[in-house]
Image (spheres, grey):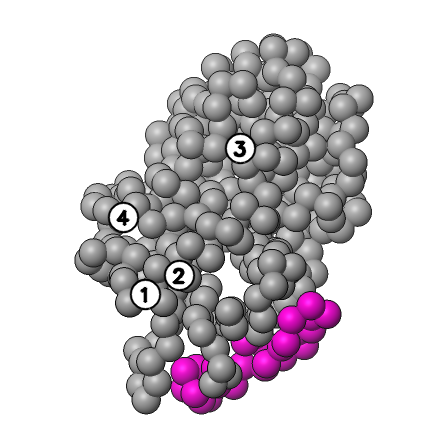
Amino acid sequence: MNITIVYDGVIPVNLYGGTQRVIWYLGHELSKLGHKVTFLVEEKSFCSFASVIFMDKEQDIWNQIPKDTDVVHFHQTPPKQTNTSFPYVVTMHGNSNASLDKNTIFVSKNHAQRYNSYSYVHNGLDWNDYMKPDFNKKNYFHFLGKAAWRIKNVKGAINVVKKTKTEYLKVMGGKRLNLTMGFRFTLTHRASFYGMVGGKQKHDLLNHSKGLIFPVLWHEPFGLAITESLFYGCPVFGTPYGSLPELVNTEVGFLSNKREELTNAIENISDFSNQKCHEYALEYFNSKKMAISYIDKYEHVLNNHYLNDSHPKLKNNQTEKFLDWFE
């Protein structure tokens, strides 16, 4: 089939860019499975395995979709259809209080259920693009995420490490001095900061880490930081919110919203197998599995069915700014 993927951004990704990474691997897998893929994306994008059309934001998106398209896959909120009627699906990558399209696909079962839906596809990555895991780990843990967002709780991750005798944290996605959301300066010798990293540097840091510390304070829709870390044999130590209980079973990590319990868990990291963590990510969160799942969704709308019986909407709006975290 002919599939047009719409995303308001540039591909391929330069540094981290979770959504760009997912749609890139989705398009690649669909192409390998024999489908024709077109990306409708921002200027400066390029791709060797699919056609690329630059998005004109002054024009109706629907009028920019190739006429031979069988199904459109939006990774942003689609505008209302005007003079065209392509079958389409929409992947929701974040959280929203709005009423969503009836063809919305969420990125985890928990994500879907919170919107009174059962339509979801787990994100997958092409592990062939990653380094061979090295299970001879060094003497540090890592944090991976936008540390400027308080909901990511880099402060909690640092405190988990500080309460151990000797452990050390490497923070990817943040800086020691952060002026983005007010003045924040992290003064501790038990953590180092690497800013936004990508490519070989990121893979090196992940590959030699003992584990991911991920005490988020919101309902994480998915979390590529989790699956990338698991691929490199890193167990995950996080909070039991959003998709984490779905992705992190007791063989590959430990979840708690209590700092003391997470500290105890990382001090007993030998309870976890690097090999099991790697094999788990390899089997369940690969891009081919993701692509096949999306094809099933495409076929559903091509048969004139909605993916949801009604417009998905949060069952319970989160009134508190941050979920519970106990120091």
Q: CA distance from mark 1 to mark 2?
A: 6 Å
Q: Residue 303: which numbered mark, if any?
A: 1
What's the distance in space between the residues labelled 2 and 4, CA to CA? 18 Å
Q: Earlier in the sequence, mark 2 or mark 4?
A: 4
Instruction: Name the spot of residue 255 as percent of width and height, x first.
Output: 46, 23
123 over 79 or under it: above or below: above
- Mark 1 is surrounded, within 10 Å at the Cα level, by few (under 14), some (14 to 19) or many (20 or more) other residues, namely few
Q: Quadrant of residue 83?
A: bottom left
Which tag is nearer the camera, tag 3 or tag 1? 1
Q: Nearer the viewer, mark 1 or mark 4?
A: 1
Name the foreground residue: 17 vs 168: 17
Q: Earlier in the sequence, mark 3 or mark 1?
A: 3
Q: Earlier in the sequence, mark 2 or mark 3?
A: 3
Check disc 2 and report the residue beneath it. Answer: 299
Disc 4: which residue: 117
Relative to the observer, which residue lies in front, 145 or 271?
A: 271
Tag 1 near tag 2, CB within 8 Å: yes
Q: Nearer the viewer, mark 3 or mark 4?
A: 4
Q: Amino acid at mark 1?
A: Asn
Measuring from the top left, give residue 185's x and y in whole percent.
61, 41
Mark 2 and mark 3 residues within 8 Å of each other at the beta carbon: no
- Residue type, mark 2 in image: Glu
- Residue labelled with disc 3: 214
**What is the crowding at mark 4: few (fewer than 14 residues within 10 Å), some, or many (at least 20)?**
many
| Label 3, residues with CA under 10 Å away: few <14, some 14-19, many ≥20 | many
Measured in 3D between alpha carbons, the distance from the residue under mark 3 to the one under mark 1, in whole angstroms, is 41 Å
